[in-house]
Image (cartoon, helix red, strand yellow):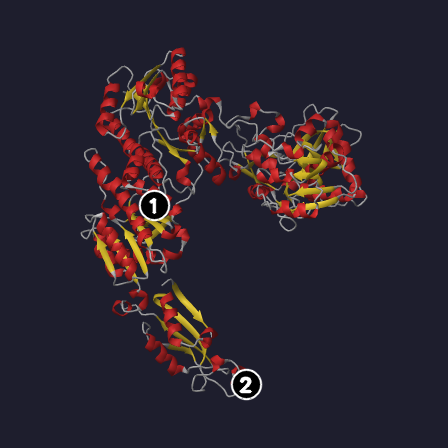
Amino acid sequence: ESHDIIFVASILQTTSDINHSLNSLRRLLVPGGLLFVVKLTLTHSYFDFIFGLFPYWWRNNYSRAPLNIDQWRQAFQSVGGFEPMEVSSKANTFGDSLMIVRKSIVRSILINLSEWQDQAWLLFVDRAHNLSYALVPHLPSSNIEVLSDAVTIDHISSTINIMLKRHKQLHIVFAWPLDVLQLGQNNNETTFELHVEHLCYKFVYILQSIQKYHQHNNPFPYIFILTQNCQPIHAMSVKFNPIIAPLIGLARSLSVQCPHHHIKLIDLQPTAGIFVKSSYSDILVQYIVDSREDNNLDEVILTLDKDNHVQCFRWYYDSLQSKEQQEVSPKMKTSIVPKTDADKNPFRLQVASSRFVSDLAWVKDPIPINDLSPDKTLVRVHCVGLNFRDVLKARGLYPHTRVFGEGDCDQNVADHDSSVGTDFMGIVTVSRSEDLKIGDRVIGSCMAGALHSHVVVSTSVIARVPDECLLTDEQLAALPTPFLTALHSLKQRIQLKKGQIVLIHAATGATGQACIQYCQAVGARIIATAEHVFNSRDLSFAAEIRTLFPNGINVIINSLAGILLQESFKLLAPHGHFIELGKRDVYAKTSLPIFDMRQNCNFHIIDLVQHLQDEIHTIRGMFDDIFDHFRRGLFKPFEPLTVFEPSKIIDAFTQASIGASMGKTILRVTNSEQPVLLQEDEKNTMISESSRKGSMFSSLVCENGTILVSGGLGGLGLTMSRWMVEKRGVKHIVLMSRRTVEQFEKAENNPELEDWLQLKEIAVKHNACIDVVQVDVTRCDDVCNLVKRLNQTSYPVRGIIHSAVISDDRLLANLNQETLFRVMGPKVRGGWNLHNASQQTDTSLHFFVMFSSIRNHLIDPGSSGYNAGNEFFEALAHHRREHLQLPALSVALPAVSGAGMFHRQQTLLNSLLTAQVIEALETVPTFEIIELLFNMQTDYSIKAGSS
C-alpha cells in the first residue's frame, strides 16, 4: 500500500487471470487510492484479423477475451475492496473506455483484504500511554500485538517468533522510549539502569530475535523507533531530553550494520495531549506507512506549527561559524561586470579561513603596479585553467609535506593556500620589456596565484601568443601545465624516441592528452588506460597489457597509487622509464618494490612546480616549443573544456576536484560578461597565534584552577595533559583512573607508560602539579565527592575533559548485555556524572570538553555501543549550552596519531583509513583545533573574578 494513483492500459489484456491482476493492483494502492484503467470494452469483427493470432485474445470457449463495461464492474466487485466503478469516457471509435475505481477507506472492509491480513504490527508501547490508544485504530491491519515494557526478553523473543511465522510482513513500532523519564538529580542511577542501558539492550535483543527467527521467503520487518523531544530542531527546542540519545546512536550504527532491518527514527515533538488527537495519529501512521520504501526518510522529526499543522524536519550537516561571524552584519558586497569594470574594480579570489570550497569568494584587490621592475609585466587575466593542485590549496591540503594546521607563513610563496591558480591567459597592460607590447595576448604560469583580475609576473614565465594562432582564450588557458609537464617529462628527461611503447595512465585528462599528442608527434606507440581502452580502476589492465606486450613497456606515465602503481612497475621493459606524476605514494612514504626495476630501469619524479622555480629561464623556450608544435599541426586543443563564469567559482572548483573528470576545467575572469559580487578583503589565517592563546586557557584556569581529566591515564588524556602543561602553562591537573599509579606502572604491555613518564618529566620542568586519583567515572557518588573535595582546595575545578572510553567492537550477533553496558558506561554514565557533579557542587566551570568520535558520523559497523556514548555526548553538550547556558563542547575526533584508542588498535585504524579514506591527525594540531572550536563558541564560561 504505497501508491495514491495507478494508471493501467493494455497490460491487463495479456493476463490469464483478471481477478488475480486486479487483486495485485489493489494491494499497491493506499486506502482511498485511485486506479485508472484504459481498456478495450467494445470490439469489432476486424479486430480478429489484428489480434486473433495472439492466444490472450480468446477465452477458453473461443469468445473474445476483452470485457465490456458490465463485466468490468462485476470483476471489480468480485475482487472486493473497491468502491463502485465509474466510467469517465465510454468506448470511442476504437473501442477504448476509461474506467476509474477507488480503493475503499472503510476499515471494516479493509481488514478483510489480503494486504491487511498478510501484515502484522507489533507495538512496544505501554498500554496506558495515550499513543497506544491513538495508533491501534489507524494501523492498516487487524493483526496487532501490544507489549508493555514490563515483559521479559523471553516473551519478546517468543512473540517475534510466532508473528514472523504467522505473517508475511511484520512491522515493529518501538515506542518504549516515549515513557522515559527526564534526567534529574535524584533519579540518575535508576534512569540510566532502567531507561537507558536496559532499553538499549532490549532493542538489540529485538534485532537478534528477528535474525534468529526470520523466515527466508518473507521480507525483514520494518522497525520504527519513536522518541519524544530527543532531537532538537533548533537551539532552544522545548523540553529537550538527552536521555534517549544513546538509543539513537545505537540505532544508527545498527542500521548501517543491518540495512535489511529498515530501521527508521521518528522523533515526536507534539504539544501536551496531542497524542489523543485523531489528526496527529492519522498523520503519524500515514507517515510510517509511506516511509517504508523511502530511504531518505530514515531519520526525521515530526512536530506541530502554530496552526497545528504537522511539519517534518530532516537533519543535515552545517558549517561551524565563529562567534564573530555570528555577530557581524553581512559583508558589504559590490556587483561588477568583469569585462567592463575590472580595471576600475580589480579583484582576486580569497581562500576562506575555514578552507571550505563552499566559502570561496571574490574580494577587492588593488593592482600591484608600484615600482614595476624591467623584468616584470602586468597582465589582465582573461581565463585560468584549474589544476587539482589548486583544489588542494583551496582546501588547505597542499603541499603534502605540510603539517595539519600549519599556516601560509611556514610555506614558500608558491605553496601558499592563497596562491591559487597557475595557468592563465591574458592581455599585457603594462610592460617594460621590448619583447612584449601592451595588448599582446599571452599565456603563462603564475606561481603567486593567477586567480586575480591582474597579475604581475616575470617575463620569463609568459609567452606571446603568435598572431596566426586561432585558439580561443579558454583553449589557451588550458595549455601551460599539461604541455609543460609533457615536454619536461618526455622530451627533457627521457628524450622519447620513435617506436618506443608508452603506457599513459588516466589518459583522458588534460595532461594525459598532452602526453598522447607529444608521443604521436615523436612517433611513439601509445597505450592509454582510460575507462574505454584499458581500465586503470582495477588490476585488469596489467594482465591485458602483458599479453599484448610480453617484452614490456618502454615508458610508463603514472598517476596511480598503491597496488596499481606496484603492478605498473612489473610492466617495465629493460632500460625502461617510470615517470611518476601523482606522487601520492612518494609523499605517503610508501615502500615501493624497486626489485621490479632491477634491469637498468629509471624512476623519474616529476614536480613541475619545483622545475618552474629552479629552471625559470627555460620556461619561455618551452612555451615557444608548444606554439611551434601547434603551428606544425602536431598539437591541438584539449577536449572537452568545461568553462565556468567567475560567479560560479564554487561549481568550478567542485568540477576540478572530481577524479573522473575529462579534459580541463576553465574559469573565466576578466573576459566574463556575467555579474560577479566582490566582498571586502579580510585577513586570511588558518589558526592564528591570537586564537591559539584564546579564552580556553585563561590565567583563571591555568594558574588558579584545576583541570579534571577522566580517562586520565589513557593515551589521549596523557598527551593532552602534557601539551596543556608545556604549551599552555597549566599548573594543576587531576587524572581520574580506575587504576592506581602503582597498578598502572606495573602493568604489562602498557603502551601509555612512556607517555606517563614524559608527562611527569614535563611537569617537574614547568613546576606543574599532576595528581592521579582512583575514581570510577561511572560511580556517581565517587565523582561528586572528588569534585567537592577539589573545590575545597585553593585550586577548584575550572575545566573538565572527559576522555574515558572502553572499546569492544562487536557485530550484532555477538553483542550481549554485559558488553553493551560496559562500553556505554564510561561515556554515558560518566558524562552525566561529571555534569551532575559540577551542578550539585555549584562548580563554576570554564570549559567542559567531551571526546566523541568521527565514527559516529561514518558508515562504521560494529561500533554500536561505542557510538551510543558518542551520541549522548552531543546531546549532553546541546543540553548544557542551549538549555542551561553552561560551557560544553563535544568534539568528534578522527584517528589521532600517537594517542588514543586508534593508536592502541592499529587494525581498526588501518581499516578506517582504507574504507573511509580518513587520515590520522597529529596530537598537537588536534588539541589546537579543540581550543579553536572552544574559542569559536558563544561564551558561557566564567569570567575572571567569578566565584
- Judged left or right of residue 680, residue 205 is left
Mark 2 secondary-structure assignment = helix
Question: On screen, 326 above or below 282?
Answer: above
Mark 1 Cα shell of 10 Å, populated few (<14), some (14-19), many (≥20): few
Question: On screen, 875 above or below 105?
Answer: above
The x, y position of residue 338, in whole percent, is: 63, 40
Q: Which mark is residue 49?
A: 2
The x, y position of residue 820, in whole percent, is: 30, 39
Q: Which mark is residue 609?
A: none
Q: Quadrant of the N terminus?
A: bottom left
Q: Quadrant of the C terminus?
A: top left
- Alpha carbon distance from label 2 to label 1: 64 Å
The x, y position of residue 277, in whole percent, is: 24, 56
Contact, mark 2 vs mark 1 (Cβ under 8 Å): no
Question: On screen, 639 above or below 84?
Answer: above
Using the rendered view, name the quadrant where residue 329 is placed.
top left
- Judged left or right of residue 641, residue 175 is left
The x, y position of residue 425, in whole percent, is: 70, 38
The residue tagged 1 is 813
Residue 438 in view (yes/no): no
Given residues 576 and 92, the one toward you in this image is 576
Residue type at tag 1:
Ala
